[in-house]
Image (cartoon, rainbow, N blue to C red):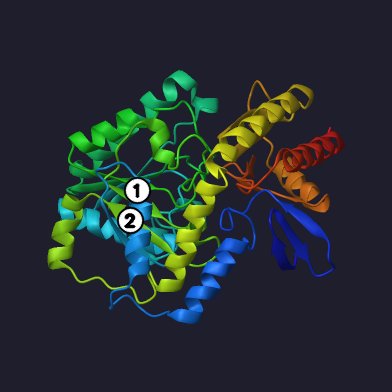
Amino acid sequence: MHTVRGEGVWLYDESGRRYLDAYNNVASIGHCHPRVVQAIAEQAARLNTHTRYLQEGILDYAESLLGTFPDALQQVMFTCTGSEANDLALRIARHYTGGTGVIITRFAYHGVTGDISSLSPSLGASIQLPAHARTVRAPDAYRLGAEQAGKLFAEDVRGAIADLRASGIKPAALLIDGIFASDGIFADPQGCIAEAVAIAHAEGLLYIADEVQCGFARTGAHMWGFQRHGVQPDLVSLGKPMGNGQPIAGVVVRPEVLEPFGRSMRYFNTFGGNPVSCAAGQAVLDVIHDEGLQQRSTQIGAYLLGELRKLSERHELIGDVRGAGMFLGVELVTDRKMKTPAAEQTRRVVNGMRERGVLISAAGPLENILKIRPLLTFQSEHADLLLQALDEVLLELA
């Protein structure tokens, strides 16, 4: 697929055909949103440089951004990508704790820098897990059971901490994505990570909430994915939708965690927090607020979730429907009782949707979960187009 233009919830190819974008988590408030375009153009015409010199834009944006977080998270450092943000968060955590050990989920994705790519098993079999890392099962309520998912997750985290220590490695951080996007999109039950986070804190680890995929109102009821679980991160990494396509990312952190790093370590990012990117970031926050996109994420997301569950009553291929807000997963299986993954059918559904002009993708270690992330500007008519296309494709496969 060769894209040449984007507008609102639509992408256009070289022939002029349009595609409903139900996957893009970068231009999440709509492709080429006029307010973001205007903010970028006006700031680029006025000033764009590095952050060695004081600029009001970065300060104003930092205040606006921090205003969306719990009071304990009072400081932010800007980077260009989510990979850089996770890399920086891990550096800060290691400096604060004096440890090196990291706990991640079995099919996590956290980025592509050297350290972070080694903590991203979803990148493929060539990724060799480093000696200082341990993996745990994601809280998969479909396969582990809703009542057991959180308990097993906590037990795995406790066991990983013990194993690191038994190997002479001091643990530093629990690094998890709040909706487990690459593991298979596990949004519920709410609070399922709370016990694990409490264990990590009690054992002296810091909790890094990777919000690169699930932040900025993506999960609907809350601005940030971790808030669904009633937990308090020590560091939060941000990226992808932060500038609606303009590169900007960052780490939000508790001051007492950042202070020793800032006092003894030098950190500078040439383009991190540049004036144009901060202008784009501010415009994104303004649009989310002014256009009620968090509320829309909740409402349209709930509508999609309900209608997808209705589809599951007609299509045996659908084993489970889950998600929160505009972050949804549909697990396909060839046998509902055995929960046999339908990887080949999943690929055919993704391609069939594209042929019908709707873009989604797939996720999970078994490659059998439809990953549906509509733009936050979706309306009910867009949701209906997606549902109709999915229904047609599933009928073809029946």
Which residue was labeled with disc 1?
A: 67
Above or below: residue 196 compared with residue 277 = above
Which residue was labeled with disc 2?
A: 63
Quarter of the image that includes the C terminus: top right
Q: Based on the displayed image, in which of its 4 quarters is residue 201 positioned? A: top left
Above or below: residue 318 compared with residue 371 = above
**Cβ–Cβ under 8 Å for marks 1 and 2:** yes
Q: Position of residue 119 (x, y in %)?
A: 39, 54
The three-letter amino acid code for the residue at tag 1 is: Gly
SS for tag 2?
helix
The three-letter amino acid code for the residue at tag 2 is: Glu
SS for tag 1?
loop
Kindly identify the residue that appears in the image at 24 percent across and 43 percent down.
72
Quarter of the image that includes the N terminus: bottom right
Question: In terms of depth relative to the viewer, which is nearer, 168 or 229?
Answer: 229
Tell me the number on the disc at residue 135: none
Q: CA distance from mark 1 to mark 2?
A: 6 Å
